[in-house]
Image (cartoon, rainbow, N blue to C red):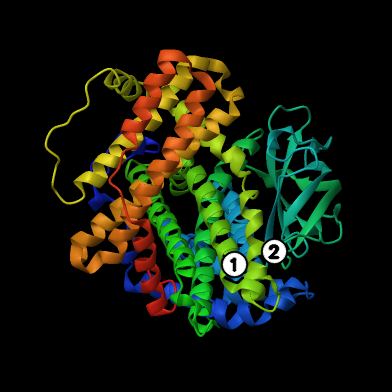
Amino acid sequence: MSNPIKGGEFLIRSTPASEIFIPEEWDEETLMIAQTCRDFIEQEINPVLDRLDAMEDGLMASKLDKAAELGLLGIATPEEYGGFGKDFKTSMLTTEILGGGHSFAVAIAAHTGIGMLPIQLYGNALQRAKYLPKMITGEWKACYCLTEPGAGSDANSGKTKAVLTSDGKYYVINGQKMWITNSGFAEVFIVFAKIDEDENLSAFIVEKSFGGVVLNSEEHKMGIKGSSTRQVFFNDCHVPVENLLSERGNGFKIAVNILNVGRLKLAGAALGGAKRVATHATKYANERHQFGRSIAKYGAIKQKIGEMAIRTYAVESALYRATQNVDDAIKALQQAGMEEAKAKLKGVEQFAAEAAILKVHGSEVLDFVVDEGVQIYGGMGYSAEAPMERAYRDSRINRIFEGTNEINRMLVVDMLLRKAMKGELDLMGPAQKVAGELMSIPDFGEPDTALFAAEKKALENFKKAVLMVAGAAVQKFMMTLAKEQEILMNIADMAIETYTAESTLLRVEKLASMRGEGACAVQLAIMRSRIYDAADRILKSGKDAVNSFAEGDEQRMMQMGLRRFTKVEPVNIKEVRRFVADYMLSTDRYNL
């Protein structure tokens, strides 16, 4: 690819469908890895979910050991350390499938993601050689100690301190961390602390055997009850100076960049959970009879199943589009001479805005799907005897994990504007062009009859709507825009709808080019319904934003522009949902 798309460019640049990756393109080797993950969940995790939730001593750790035997703890870790060295999107597929494993999904994600990645991506050669092989085999399990009682979203305000000993051999760490996943059985702790009076955090690799690591009892949580979550206290914990990770004061950057990966992986896990719940709901609808026939025959149930499938499909389309973008960026950086670990960091960092978009969208789609799943099960949905009760409780944390969805919405806009200010992304030029277009007469020429022309035009207009509102907000508030959180969240919602709708369109366009339009009837219906719904959501978010800062003629002009830019062809959404639901019901599972 001669000119791969950069992070945030989806708002100002058209993406050819041929340049994206779609899940229908997985090769046989990757599908075998995926099947291994499915078999593991079915055979090792599903039969012991109640025991895991009861925190049976040693059980979760033993399941991580079983996963290690299959190589699942080292999918994307370089082969030199005992891993498989697979690319980012392959590791995302394993994350997706394991994401249906409830508390186990949290444990393995914490170990292989925020636990291992700081060492893999920021560690020096000696640190990688010492820790990664034992983490891949499961001998050493990892956790990530960032959050403190007074430092949640504002991570850099943490008060944990590290002081160098007089002989210069150790950092002595004192402080408290909370909500630490895997802490009950971890041997390795990635700990963030400020050295002396530094403004920024530093990061350390702490072994439990160093001493001075004290754990509180397990937290009692609403969901993910099987995951170990404790407070961790560091009381004069002596950490060898060689266990400083990266450079002094680089901890906040490490935390931010690891969270970018974590946000994408969280979306993958949410996707896996949504597919699993949609399958359960579909099977139950086929089996459950009321008023003399299967409840799957009723429109109210089909509406739910159809919409569950539509939203899940959109998440998947956007997720694998973004992961391929990351892989392309990593490859380009390596070809330019950048070392592998740095290229991986930079590749993910380039798509930080898309990572935040996917974290928000994936977690909220999962919440929608599990809520509708409970409703389809009816009274049984509320019973712990059926699968929906656990899925409903376990889902809720995802809107808080990896930065709350409110924080992530604001980050979407902030990161795009920062790129623009650095000259990495020309947002204001296109925004000014859209503002000028508002004063012109709309083009009422002959419509383009090419395949997908109407849908592509709709997406082009959605982008204009985002640019118009964002550009006007920047001009209105300038440096104080960060204080207008409601407006930032409105703009983020417009961007999220645009990105996910376009991703769905590109996936279906590519699929149709591979299989023929006639073989993609269900996917075409999903795509058109997604664009139809996105138009209304973009209009509402745009109106709310504009009404928050514009008045008089400016307000009327922008509202007129929003209506123009969100005008789409009508869709019989009832029939679309029924059509998609009938396909799901005919296969008795999520099968898109």
- In the picture of the structure, the residue carrying the numbered disc 1 is 375
Q: Position of residue 330 (x, y in %)?
A: 39, 47
Q: Dot 1, crowdedness within 10 Å: few (<14), some or many (≥20)? A: some
The answer to whether residue 124 is visible is: yes
Q: Position of residue 577 (x, y in %)?
A: 39, 63
Q: CA distance from mark 2 to mark 1?
A: 21 Å
Amino acid type assigned to the residue bearing label 1 in the image: Gln
SS label for mark 1: helix
Q: Residue at x 61, y 68 (%)?
A: 374
Q: Nearer the viewer, residue 1 or 529?
A: 529
Query: Is residue 197 depicted above or below 521 in this figure?
Result: above
Q: State the count of labels.
A: 2
The answer to whether residue 349 is visible is: no
Which residue is situated farthest in the front direction here?
291
Q: Position of residue 509 (x, y in %)?
A: 24, 55
Query: Is residue 164 depicted above or below 469 in this figure?
Result: below
Q: Residue at x 25, y 65 (%)?
A: 520
Name the image quarter holding residue 526.
Answer: bottom left
Which dot, 2 or 1, sits closer to the camera?
Answer: 1
Query: Is residue 416 depicted above or below 570 in this figure?
Result: above
Q: Quadrant of the C terminus?
A: bottom left
Amino acid type assigned to the residue bearing label 2 in the image: Ile
Q: Residue at x 43, y 71 (%)?
A: 590
Mark 1 or mark 2, which is nearer the start of the sequence? 2
- Left or right for 417, reference 240: left
Q: Position of residue 49 (x, y in %)?
A: 68, 76
Q: Residue at x 24, y 40 (%)?
A: 457
SS label for mark 2: loop
- Left or right for 472, reference 149: left
- In the picture of the structure, the residue carrying the numbered disc 2 is 224
Q: Nearer the viewer, residue 266 or 473?
A: 473
